[in-house]
Every structure is written in C-alpha cells, then in structure tokens.
Image (tube, rainbow, N blue to C red):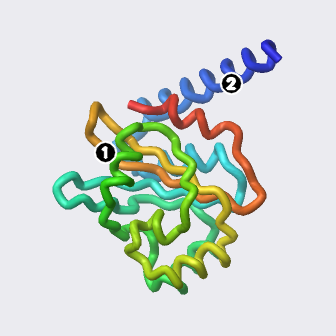
Amino acid sequence: AANEKIHQNISAIEFLSQKLLDFITMEASENIYRKIASDIKNLVFEGSIITINSFNTKTGIVTVEAAMMSNQQRDTIIRLMGIDLVGSGFLIDEAGLAGFRTGRLHKLDFPLYEILFKAVPEKICKHLESELDIGNTYAIGFVQGDEVLGSATIFIQHGKTVDNLSLLEGNRG
C-alpha cells in the first residue's frame, strides 16, 4: 500500500510538472481557458463535460469561457437552452462564491438548477440532467489570495467515478 501511494505521488508530481512546463511554453495566441479545459478533460472519462469560467468581481457574473464536451452533448445543450454554453454568464450567489474562494475541489451534491445559480429554468435543468446523464458534479475555484479569478466545473456521467481529480488542487495558484 505504501509503495502504491509513492507511485501515485510520483505520477501526480510528473503530471503537474508537465502541465507547468506546457503552461510556461504556451504560445501567447493560445486560449488559456481551452488549455485548462483540455488538461482537465485528460483526467476524466470520455462523456464528461468540462467548463472553464472567468469571474467578474464587479458584476458577480461567472462567464463560461471554454467547454469541452462531445458534439452530441453540445447539440443537446443548444437545443434545450437555446444557446451555446460558451459566452453564457451566470450571476453567482454568495454560497457559490464562498465555495470557489477555498480553491479546493468540491463535489456538488445538489441539482443542476442550483449549480447554475437558478439562472436556467428548473424544468430545462431537469431535462439537461436526464439527457446528458449527469451524475457527479465537481467544481474548483481558481483563486489568488482571497480573489476569485474563475472556476472549473466537471460534470461526470452516472455510474462513473474519477480518482485523480485531486490533482486539480495541486494546480492552484
């Protein structure tokens, strides 16, 4: 068991080192939000949905800057919501902001309606949960000091678990 833990720690260090190197050597023209989404997508199962969000401290709005998902999932969201997620803004509530401020990965044990800060009608959220087969949902805030810069949200399909999401916390600034 101790040997396995050592190998897990070494793998985590290697992963984070590679991501740091990738970030440092990133072209100025590359989209940082898409890069983060792609890195997280590599940690989770196919079929998961990843959103990377910016946060405007003046307006309190979280804006989806990048989203990684299948074309079928994107089509479902557009059909049910009438919009593409990228570019969508949601007014965050104080509880959500407090969760993001920790910079820790949180499993969100409440419905999509609340995850989207009640900005999307509950009936549409229920259809999204069903058609996208959303199971566990996780979120992490990107913070610098006490300031929330943005967040990532990870929607995992029912019946799937992810053991290495804790690597995201090692990626905190």
- Kind of residue indicated by mark 2: Ser
- Whether label 2 touches label 1, CB < 8 Å: no
134 on left or right of 60: right
- Kind of residue indicated by mark 1: Leu
| Labelled disc at residue 11 | 2
Q: Secondary structure at mark 1?
A: strand
CA–CA distance in space, label 2 to label 1: 28 Å
Task: Judge by depth and name the residue closer to the eye, 30 or 99.
Answer: 99
Q: Secondary structure at mark 2?
A: helix
92 on left or right of 163: left
Query: Which residue is depicted at the point 67% across and 37% down?
Result: 164
Q: Position of residue 11 (x, y in %)?
A: 68, 24
58 on left or right of 155: left
Query: Which residue is depicted at the point 77% across and 58% down?
Result: 159
Mark 2, Cα crowd under 10 Å, few <14 / some 14-19 / many 20+, is few
Q: Residue under circle 1?
A: 149
Q: Position of residue 71 (x, y in %)?
A: 62, 72
Mark 2 or 1 closer to N-term? 2
Task: Judge by depth and name the residue closer to the eye, 163 or 67.
Answer: 163
Q: Quadrant of the C terminus?
A: top left
Mark 1, Cα crowd under 10 Å, few <14 / some 14-19 / many 20+, is some
The correct choice, above or below, for 156 with respect to 171 in the image is: below
The correct choice, above or below, for 141 with respect to 146 in the image is: below
Q: Quadrant of residue 157?
A: bottom right
Query: Which residue is depicted at the point 63% across and 26% down?
Result: 12
